[in-house]
């Protein structure tokens, strides 16, 4: 199968990529959707606590839409 990128466009936080593909003399089109989302929130405590939380979020692959819930549930010892 061959796949050729035809073009890209952005709509809000979504990027659409358009392709043409071919297999054994048959051709078709495909569209891929890539979403770019971000979120932020304040962390009580010092920088080290924020870094530790960010590393935990990374290890557990937390998505932007879940950050506010995680911050609500996360407790920082004083």
Image: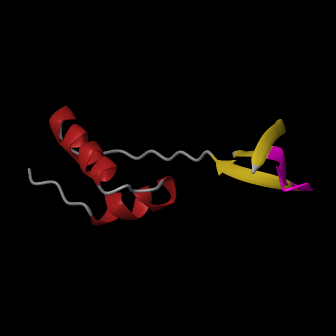
Query: Can you tell which quarter of the image residue 9 is in?
Result: top right
Q: Nearer the viewer, residue 57 or 28?
A: 28
Q: Give the image location of residue 35, x and y in percent.
A: 64, 49
Q: Is residue 11 visible?
A: no
State whether the magenta stretch is mostly helix, strand or loop: strand
78 displayed left or right of 10: left
Count all numbered tags in the image, as a single digit: 0
List the single residue furthest toward the left: 78
Q: Residue at x 84, y 56 (%)?
A: 24
Q: Residue at x 32, y 48 (%)?
A: 58
Magenta stretch in the rendered image: 18-28
Q: Nearer the viewer, residue 73 or 26?
A: 26
Query: Can you tell which quarter of the image residue 4 is in?
Result: top right
48 displayed left or right of 14: left
Q: Give the image location of residue 23, x and y in percent.
A: 82, 55
Q: Give the image location of residue 26, x and y in percent.
A: 91, 58
Q: Nearer the viewer, residue 27 or 44?
A: 27
Magenta span has 31? no
């Amino acid at each position: 199968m061959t796949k050729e990128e035809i073009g890209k466009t952005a709509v809000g936080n979504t990027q659409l990529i358009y392709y043409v593909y071919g297999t054994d003399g048959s051709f078709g089109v495909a569209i891929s959707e890539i979403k770019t989302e971000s979120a932020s929130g304040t962390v009580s405590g010092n920088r080290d606590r924020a870094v530790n939380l960010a590393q935990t979020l990374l290890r557990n692959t937390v998505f932007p839409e879940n950050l506010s819930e995680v911050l609500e549930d996360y407790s920082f010892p004083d």
